[in-house]
């Protein structure tokens, strides 16, 4: 059986320990954004007030290597980039209802709930009993969370008629939709585009606008057809969305890095919204 392994495990020491069921428990370290980050303050004597860094850890159980259909059981770089962005926009997003699509083991949803006093919906298809694992990881980090995290199944491939009433209500209540590293073959990419379309249709019907944030790492391969190194999944996504009535903006990655990982040049963060 062919397996794949996330590169982040070999780049950063997350202090992995074996769990009882054969998986791994890792510590994803971060620094808390200081109050008034980016604003210089002085004390009563007129001296620059240097704020001490507060540090924290999201502890996650996950797999170390999996077959391709179970890659959600690992942690990938896009989830850490998305977590950084959530921390950087904690004031704007702190009161929003958030839904994560294809949440994997839950890192980005847990990061969102650290600064969110509202509701975070954490969704994925239940392959490899991943929903149970997400719930366990949420409970493992409960002491960090301000808001409530609900775990719901969302299968991109399922017909819309089979989506649960609980999921549809969560979609309608959500202000912000986020996803990280959810496209890695053409069929899944097409299904994800259809999911975005469905969410926007419901948003228009309900009158509650949505903004979608999508993080991914461009993975280059050399093809004889192109005689060049290309990022096929990223480029396929752009082709499939080019004629949609959407605005796709690439967000500059100039926001602070709070989590420990290598922020490589291949990382991309997009904001997707509907044209009015």
Image (spheres, helix red, strand yellow):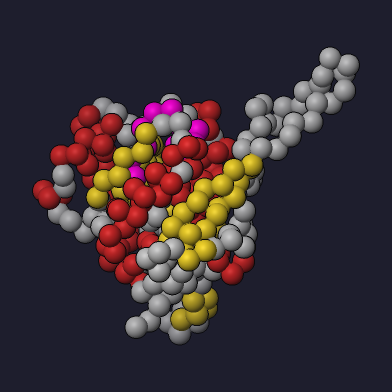
Q: Residue furthest top?
A: 44
Residue 179 in sight: no
Q: Is residue 71 above or below residue 50?
A: below
Q: Is residue 169 visible?
A: yes
Q: Quadrant location of residue 262?
A: bottom right
Look at the image and give the residue range highlighted in magenta: 112-122
Q: Please provide percent x and percent y for residue 236.
A: 38, 64
Taking the image as shown, residue 255 lies to the left or right of residue 273, namely: right
Q: Vertical placement of 98 versus 126: above or below?
A: above
Looking at the rendered image, the quarter that the N terminus falls into is: bottom left
What residue appears at the point 77 percent right and 26 percent down from the top-left corner?
Answer: 40
- Residue 120 magenta-drawn? yes
**Which residue occupies 88% across, 16% down?**
45
For the point 38% across and 56% down, which residue is it?
A: 104
Q: Nearer the viewer, residue 66 or 100?
A: 66
Give residue 151's position: percent from left, percent from top. 30, 44
Q: Position of residue 117 (x, y in %)?
A: 43, 28
117 vs 80, left or right, is left
Residue 213 lies left or right of residue 267; in this view the side is left
In percent of the image, x 58 and y 60: which residue is there?
A: 14
**Which residue ends up furthest to the left in the rendered image?**
161
Q: Is residue 203 magenta?
A: no
Can you say which quadrant of the picture contains the C terminus?
top left
Q: Quadrant of residue 122?
A: top left
């Amino acid at each position: 059986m062919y397996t794949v392994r996330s590169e982040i495990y070999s780049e950063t020491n997350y202090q992995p320990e074996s769990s009882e069921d054969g998986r791994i428990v890792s510590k994803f370290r971060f620094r808390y954004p200081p109050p008034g980050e980016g604003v210089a303050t002085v004390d009563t004597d007129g001296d620059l007030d240097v704020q001490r860094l507060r540090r924290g850890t999201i502890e996650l159980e996950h797999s170390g290597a999996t077959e391709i259909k179970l890659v959600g059981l690992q942690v990938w770089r896009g989830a850490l980039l998305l977590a950084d962005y959530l921390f950087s926009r904690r004031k704007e997003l702190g009161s929003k209802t958030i839904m994560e699509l294809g949440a994997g083991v839950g890192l980005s949803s847990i990061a969102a709930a650290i600064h969110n006093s509202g509701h975070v919906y954490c969704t994925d298809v239940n392959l490899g009993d991943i929903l149970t694992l997400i719930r366990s990881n949420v409970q493992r980090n409960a002491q960090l969370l301000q808001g409530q995290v609900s775990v719901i199944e969302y299968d991109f491939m399922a017909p819309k008629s089979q989506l649960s009433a609980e999921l549809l209500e969560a979609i309608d209540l959500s202000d912000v939709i986020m996803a990280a590293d959810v496209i890695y073959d053409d069929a899944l990419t097409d299904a994800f585009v259809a999911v975005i379309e469905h969410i926007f249709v419901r948003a228009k019907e309900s009158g509650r606008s949505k903004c979608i944030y999508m993080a991914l790492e461009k993975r280059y391969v050399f093809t004889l057809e192109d005689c060049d190194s290309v990022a096929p999944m990223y480029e396929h996504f752009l082709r499939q969305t080019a004629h949609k009535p959407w605005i796709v903006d690439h967000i500059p990655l100039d926001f602070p890095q709070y989590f420990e990982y290598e922020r490589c040049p291949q990382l991309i963060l997009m904001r997707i919204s509907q044209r009015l």
